[in-house]
């Protein structure tokens, strides 16, 4: 966590905002007392869309031979 005075923060606000990493914080002080905290906004992850994997799996042959070992568990 970085600590800056109010004057330093005012002079470099654009750089502070652009260089703040996700989850990063900057405490702003005045007269050696904390007066504000600048916190980076959380990064939103893209939600997977249905059907994005369509066509990626190709079944070459139907093979039930591998199921023989599980025959007693199947109806």
Image: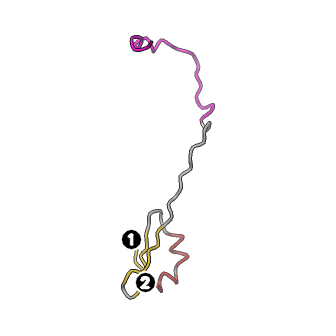
Label 1, label 2: how many angstroms apart (C-alpha)? 14 Å
User: Looking at the rendering, in which quadrant would you find the C terminus?
Assistant: top left
Q: Residue at x 36, y 85 (%)?
A: 32
Residue annotated with mark 1: 1
**Which one is nearer the viewer's eye here, 19 or 73?**
73
Disc tally is 2
Callout 2 crowding tier (Cα within 10 Å): few <14, some 14–19, many ≥20: some
Q: Residue at x 46, y 84 (%)?
A: 6
When the figure is inspected, residue 74 is found, relative to residue 9, above or below; the finding is above
Task: Residue 14 in the image: state x and y as whole percent.
Answer: 55, 76
User: Looking at the rendering, in which quadrant would you find the N terminus?
Assistant: bottom left
When the figure is inspected, residue 22 is found, relative to residue 50, above or below; the finding is below
Task: Residue 67 in the image: state x and y as whole percent.
Answer: 45, 14
Q: Quadrant location of residue 24?
A: bottom left
Which residues make up the magenta segment?
Answer: 53-75
Q: Quadrant location of residue 50?
A: top right
Outermost residue on the left side: it is 32
Image check: 35 left or right of 55?
left
Task: Residue 48 in the image: state x and y as whole percent.
Answer: 57, 43
Residue annotated with mark 2: 5
Task: Residue 21 in the image: state x and y as whole percent.
Answer: 47, 65
Outermost residue on the front side: it is 75
Callout 1 crowding tier (Cα within 10 Å): few <14, some 14–19, many ≥20: few
Image check: 19 left or right of 53?
left
**Which one is nearer the viewer's eye here, 51 or 14?**
51
**Which one is nearer the viewer's eye here, 42 or 69?**
42
Q: Could you say which disc has been placed on residue 43 in the image?
A: none
Residue 61 shown in magenta: yes
């Amino acid at each position: 966590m970085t600590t800056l005075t109010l004057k330093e923060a005012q002079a470099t606000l654009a750089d502070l905002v652009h260089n703040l990493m996700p989850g990063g914080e900057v405490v702003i002080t005045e007269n050696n007392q904390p007066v504000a905290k600048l916190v980076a906004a959380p990064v939103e992850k893209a939600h997977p869309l249905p059907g994005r994997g369509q066509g990626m799996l190709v079944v070459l042959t139907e093979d039930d031979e591998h199921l023989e070992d599980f025959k007693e568990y199947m109806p």
